[in-house]
Image (cartoon, grey):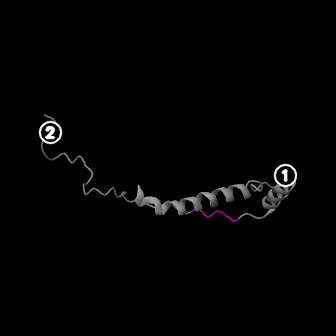
Amino acid sequence: MEILWWLAPAAVVTVLAMAWVGWTGRDGRGQVDRDVAVARLAAAMERDQPKVRRTAPRSRSDRSTGIAVRPSRSTGVGPGADGA
């Protein structure tokens, strides 16, 4: 336990900084007047929106799982292939 005492000043400073930031930032939580928010929303909706470019879907390759095993495929050859 004695070996960790050098961490005490850093921990105290960290806790004090967190308390100070929490106390000073508690009033202005980013709240905007309702009229200002409505005006911003109206302005954003009136702007021309960029056109959405749709591309052809890409062919998906097999996802790598990190395991070097090929997926099993039924070829009809091998033991038990005749169903007997």
Residue beneath the point at 41% across and 55% down: 1
Q: Secondary structure at mark 1?
A: helix
Q: Earlier in the sequence, mark 1 or mark 2?
A: 1
Mark sitting on residue 34:
1
Left or right placement of residue 13 versus residue 50 in this view? left
Quadrant of the rendered structure where residue 54 is?
bottom right
Q: Quadrant of the C terminus?
A: top left
Question: Which region of the structure is painted magenta?
Answer: 50-54
Q: Position of residue 26 (x, y in %)?
A: 74, 54
Residue 3 screen position, x and y as percent: 40, 60
**Where's residue 33, x and y in %?**
84, 54
Q: Which residue is rendered at x = 64% and y = 62% of the image?
A: 52
Examine the image and state in which quarter residue 19 appears. Answer: bottom right
Looking at the image, is mark 1 or mark 2 nearer the viewer?
A: 1
What type is the residue that disc 2 sits on? Asp
Task: Tell whether 66 sits left or right of 33.
Answer: left
Crowding at mark 1 (Cα within 10 Å: few <14, some 14-19, many 20+) = few
Identity, as a three-letter code, of the amino acid under mark 1 = Arg
Q: Nearer the viewer, residue 36 or 25?
A: 25
How far apart marks 1 and 2 lie (CA) works out to 75 Å
Q: How many numbered marks are there?
A: 2
Assess whether residue 52 is covered by the magenta stretch: yes
